Image (spheres, rainbow, N blue to C red):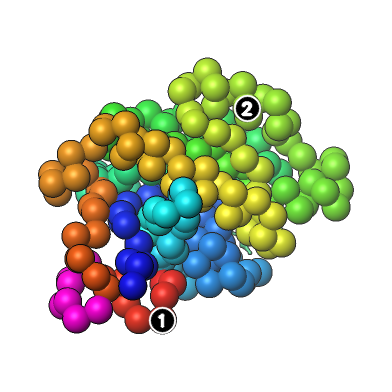
Amino acid sequence: MPQPWDYIAKVVNIGDSGCGKSSLTIRLCEGRFNPQHDVTIGVEFGSRIIPVSAEKKIKLQVWDTAGQESFRAITKSYFRGATGALLVYDITRRETFEHVQEWLDELRAAADQNISIILVGNKCDLAEADPGKRKVTVEEAREWAEAHGLKAAVETSAKTGESVEEAFVDCAKEIYKNIVGGVYDLNDKSHGIKANTAKTSIGIDDQAKPPKGGCC
Ligand code: GDP
Ligand code: MG
């Protein structure tokens, strides 16, 4: 019987409050959208298994800030061991894009140097409905991402689901590239990545085994 996943990796969502970090996590892990901005409902983490090659799957464990995302309030332990990150801004609020630099600096200071970071411009549905709402162009986001060594820049809508999977898949594939390239020491627990060491998925009481029923 094939294993449900081969690797598990920690991915953190960062960016200003209200950009849609929780909504992206809920969309990926539960396939739904909640129009209310209620920080108390914010998930702390969810997970989703992503195929990264014909045979291999990575279980992404997505960490969400649950509403304490002012710059200094996010503790180093949130970033520690993160193998991937979604750096999220809201394409309808220019200031959230202007802050991605600060978020990136925080992240690079605290996380592993090999972290795979994807720039995510969320709420693209709003600009599709009314182009006047767009305050950040696709081109400038791409240029910024490239200039700062980020792996990709994607525009998403947690509301419609557009490209949400793509953003997380891009991140998972970058992580897998690093695994294949031998970048991580999979025995070192300080990396937020582990291989599934269970020989089969039945009959072994493996602590790392995902909970029954899949997702979050
Ligand atoms: P967070 O503070 O970054 O976790 O942001 P939330 O996920 O709580 O979202 C903030 C608000 O924006 C909520 O009212 C969401 O319903 C709304 N929202 C999130 N993503 C989208 C999106 O893609 N499109 C639209 N139109 N609204 C969104
Ligand atoms: Mg949130």
Tell me residue 49's x, y (percent).
43, 62
Examine the image and state in which quarter residue 119 appears.
top right
Q: Residue at x 42, y 32 (%)?
A: 104
Q: Amino acid at mark 2?
A: Arg
> Disc 1 marks which residue?
213
User: In the image as oriented, which residue stretches furthest toward the top?
Assistant: 147
- Distance CA(mark 2)–CA(mark 1): 37 Å
| Circle 1 residues within 10 Å: few <14, some 14–19, many ≥20 | few
Q: Nearer the viewer, residue 38 or 188?
A: 188
Left or right: 29 in relation to 4:
right
User: Which secondary structure, mark 2?
Assistant: helix
Q: Work out whether 154 lies above or below 49.
A: above
Q: Nearer the viewer, mark 2 or mark 1?
A: 1
Magenta span: helix, strand or loop, mainly?
A: loop
> Disc 2 marks which residue?
142
**CB at mark 2 closer than 8 A to ligand 1?**
no
Labels 2 & 1 near each other (Cβ < 8 A): no
Q: Residue at x 54, y 62 (%)?
A: 28
Asked whether residue 73 appears in the rendered view, the answer is no
Residues in magenta, as a range? 202-208
Left or right: 137 in relation to 74:
right
Please report whichever mark, 2 or 1, sits nearer to the chain's N-terminal start.
2
User: In the image as oriented, which residue stretches furthest toward the left?
Assistant: 188
Tell me residue 122's x, y (percent).
63, 48
Q: Nearer the viewer, residue 140 or 175?
A: 175
